[in-house]
Image: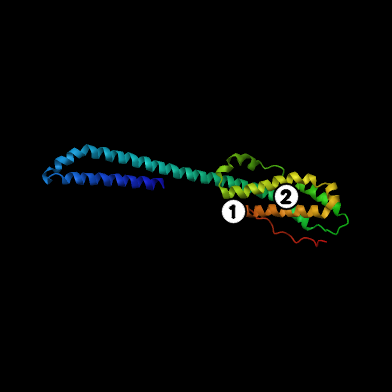
Amino acid sequence: MLIYAAVALLIAVVLSLVVLLALDLRRHKQSEWIEELKQWQSLLGAVLGFLGAAGVLVLGSAIESDNERARQAQAAHAIGTGLALEVERLSVGLQVGRQIGASVDFADPALVQVCADYAKALQRALAPDTPVYDAVLGRMVDFGDVNLSVFVRFYAFYEDFLRGLPEIDEAACTAAAGDEIRYIIGQINGGLGYYEIIAKRYDTTPPQPAPQPQAQT
């Protein structure tokens, strides 16, 4: 946009100069035009020199601007690819949790113990650290709104899910084992839904389809 405006301004200056020269020549006889042009020579040279310098400046600014946009796009893509690969790693534990949840028999008389064991198994299966996300968090503002929203949603879910798992202990499972298990399954499915969007965008391994759960009572 800047280069178009600059070119338009340069053309306007040249046309204005040509019009002024034509008007000035019309005030003189044709035999005097050569002398009149000599008087305009220094002005024409200065203007043309200015236009040349301005053209070089505008062109250089446009090239630098294009290069900067290309660098920003490359950096954003590199950040996104790194985050997508980390999310792919984190999703492995979530998929394990979904497989376990699908095998739960809600009619099992030992459902309280199943609930507590399920929460403990997830704590072991889920990766506790997110080094890539932590490293690029300060640059996320340059990442673009669309990518920023999907990654922040996934990582916010993951951190909250990890933080809440220790609260699903034997006491919580004794109070409502079935509800706690269903809550875990729902959270996992939501997190994998975020990852599925990321996997499509960055061509990483998509999550496996959700298995059919056991009949619930």
Location of the C terminus by quadrant is: bottom right
Numbered label attached to residue 201 = 1
Mark 2 → mark 1, Cα distance in angstroms: 21 Å
Residue 143 drawn at (x, y percent) = 56, 45
SS under mark 2: helix
User: How many callouts does the rendering have?
Assistant: 2
Mark 2, Cα crowd under 10 Å, few <14 / some 14-19 / many 20+, is some
Tell me, yes or no, if residue 12 can be seen here: yes
Does the residue at mark 2 contact the one at mark 1 (Cβ under 8 Å)? no
Numbered label attached to residue 93 = 2
Picture quadrant of residue 16 = top left
Q: Residue at x 75, y 54 (%)?
A: 185
* Amino acid type assigned to the residue bearing label 2 in the image: Gly
Residue 123 drawn at (x, y percent) = 77, 46
Residue 22 vs residue 27, the one in the foreground: 27
SS under mark 1: helix
Residue 190 drawn at (x, y percent) = 69, 54
Q: Residue at x 63, y 46 (%)?
A: 152
Q: Residue at x 12, y 42 (%)?
A: 32
Q: Is residue 42 left or right of residue 167?
A: left
Residue 38 vs residue 200, the one in the foreground: 38
Residue 183 vs residue 61, the one in the foreground: 183
Picture quadrant of residue 132 = top right
